[in-house]
Image (cartoon, rainbow, N blue to C red):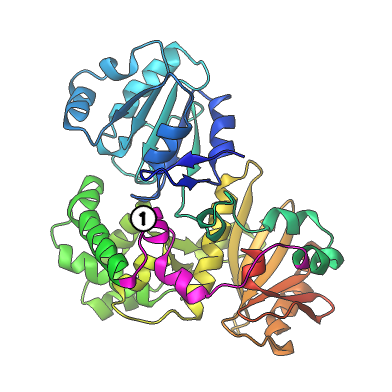
Amino acid sequence: MIIIYDMNDAPLNRLVAPGLINRLRVMPAVVVTGARQTGKSTLVQKLGPTGRIYFSLDDLDVIDAARRDPEMLVGGPGPVTLDEVQREPEFLLAVKRAIDKDRRPGRFLLTGSANLLLMHKVSESLAGRASYLTLWPMTRREQQGQGRCGIWDELLATRDEDWLDLIAAQPDEPEDWRALALRGGFPTPAIHLRTPAERTIWFDGYVRTYLERDLQELSAVAALPDFRRVMRAACFRLGQLVNQTELGRDVGLPQPTVHRYLNLLETSHLLVRLPAYAVNRTKRLIKSPKLFWGDTGVALHLTQGAEPGGAHLENLVLHDLLAWRDARVERAELFYWRTTIGEEVDIVIEAAGRLLPIEVKASAHPRLGDARHVRTFRNEYGDKARAGIVLHTGDSLKWLAPDVLAVPWWRVI
């Protein structure tokens, strides 16, 4: 077990830790991206091999050196950790030159509070030189100190007919999903702050810092009140199809501006767009995605007092799956599925050539009708589709139908 420590010396076991170490053994550079305050700096400082030199581009002297004399930071023989590199995107060119001179594994460990591959200011992606990892806010099981996500790998590796026994054997206890949604997964409010009032203060400071500093590093946004209105409107549309024209009409902004603002939120790892599943991969790019948030705590804070609803429970499940997907070496994809007549499956996992449909219900009493759309999906895709799962908020673990298992959400994530 790999355990790191946070600023208060409390053990925080992170899901991506083994993958980070393995990638440092193979690639000249590893880039850890994620939203601000997910714990990237703590992860790379505590987990990186001993003997690494650490520089943070949050330090004014370091960022000045990165602009004036980058060789001072990357030209040495030893391994280097460079934190918050999105603050000086052109600095990656110096990293590239250094790697081309010496391709030893583990030379550079970089972090960025933005998806560098989506940033327009980044002209160098380090293609073929770097492996990328995303550090999402902490999963429920990370918050419990387990250093993992839900049991998705176990479900995929187990025969459908054995799922009930697998899940029943999980050593877990019920939890109020609303409390989990309200605290979110950022380490400070999730682990260290105990009251709603304390978390409100933290979330308010987080949003303010993002708007006044982090956002400006990605793109010049003069009208911050307009941007905040788009953020808030997006939070009210959790789990809905993205309609930029309609959203713009609600906040009084043109569609191109809304489009730009949503892209910036996605680049910051705050917004998540879940694509539609279609057999034809080109059609996946055409169909409208569903909108979710990277952290439910921030989303609920921005809605100013709204109570957690079914979309937030769906968001919690998706967040756990995103953390699982991005920590894996074997690729998996996440989608939703919807027909022209409104039949819908909340989440579809595509892995190893198979499809796993998941329905999420904020109800403690799952019924046969909750399995209807999952069964329609299975009929559509035949042998490619595995049995379906309906996650709910109650305690019952049972087969709703021969091919659809009802499972308490807390037994899976």
Residue at the location (59% across, 51% down)? 146
57 lies above or below 331: above
Q: Position of residue 66 (x, y in %)?
A: 23, 25
Residue at the location (58% across, 24% down)? 26
Q: Position of residue 140 (x, y in %)?
A: 53, 60
Residue at the location (76% across, 75% down)? 405
Q: Which residues are magenta?
A: 168-196
248 lies above or below 49: below
Dot 1 crowding, Cα within 10 Å, few <14, some 14–19, many 20+ = some
Query: On the picture, is 199 further left or further right than 158?
Result: left
How many discs appear? Answer: 1
Q: Nearer the viewer, residue 323 or 246?
A: 323
In which quadrant of the rendered image does the C terminus lie?
bottom right
Residue 321 visible (yes or no):
yes
Q: Amino acid at mark 1?
A: Thr
Corner quadrant of residue 380: bottom right
In which quadrant of the rendered image does the N terminus lie?
top right
Residue 254 visible (yes or no):
no
The residue under label 1 is 188
Corner quadrant of residue 412: bottom right
Q: Nearer the viewer, residue 160 or 88?
A: 160
Q: Position of residue 322 (x, y in %)?
A: 54, 56
Task: Decide whether residue 58 is among the magenta residues.
Answer: no
Query: On the picture, is 35 further left or further right than 384?
Result: left
SS at badge 1: helix
Q: Position of residue 215 (x, y in %)?
A: 24, 52
Residue at the location (75% across, 77% down)? 397
Q: Nearer the viewer, residue 92 or 47?
A: 47
